[in-house]
Image (tube, rainbow, N blue to C red):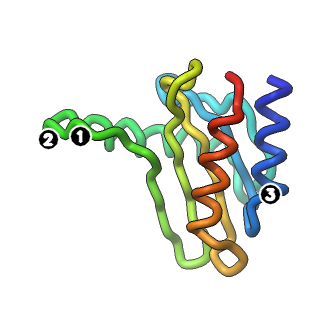
Amino acid sequence: MANTETSLKEALASIEGATGAALVDYTSGMALGTIGGSKGFDLTVAAAGNTDVVRAKIRTMEHLGLKGEIEDILITLSDQYHLIRLMKGRGGNGLFLYLVLDAKRSNLAMARHQLKRIEADLEV
């Protein structure tokens, strides 16, 4: 878990505008690690809720017969971006990284690039 928390701290420190991050198991909905958030924004609750988003997208792709893999899912709010990155390889099956960004302080393209790098470095 130390590597997970280190990677999440790295995500918050290195991604401009990041306010919270979590590593989530979408088979159970459980957050395996979180960092950031606030009293009014519980990352554990957000992680569980976004598990439903991931499951729904996977199910829809199966119904449509789509063969591609989900790289990430973006949810835009008026003042935040929520970025969900499904993990690939090295034990990452069933896991996703969840990143919350302040829309006014972040560069979405750069955040996606940095989150991909963090995913590659993360040992689960």
Mark 1 → mark 2, Cα distance in angstroms: 5 Å
> Disc 3 designates what residue?
14
Mark 3 → mark 1, Cα distance in angstroms: 32 Å
The residue carrying pointer 1 sits among few (fewer than 14), some (14 to 19) or many (20 or more) residues within 10 Å by Cα, namely some
Give the vertical position of 4 relative to 104 (above or below): above
Give the vertical position of 50 relative to 76 (above or below): above
The residue carrying pointer 2 sits among few (fewer than 14), some (14 to 19) or many (20 or more) residues within 10 Å by Cα, namely few
> Disc 1 designates what residue?
61
Q: Quadrant of the N terminus?
A: top right
Outermost residue on the left side: it is 64
Q: Could you tell whether 37 is left or right of 92 in the image?
A: right
> Disc 2 designates what residue?
64
Q: Could you tell whether 113 is left or right of 27 in the image?
A: right
Please give the name of the residue rendered at 37% of the width and 36% of the height, measured from the top-left corner.
55
Q: Secondary structure at mark 3?
A: helix
| Res 83 → quadrant | bottom right
Question: 123 or 40, which is in the foreground?
Answer: 123
Name the residue type under label 2: Leu
Expressed as whole percent of the image width and height from the top left, the position of residue 72 reads 46, 49
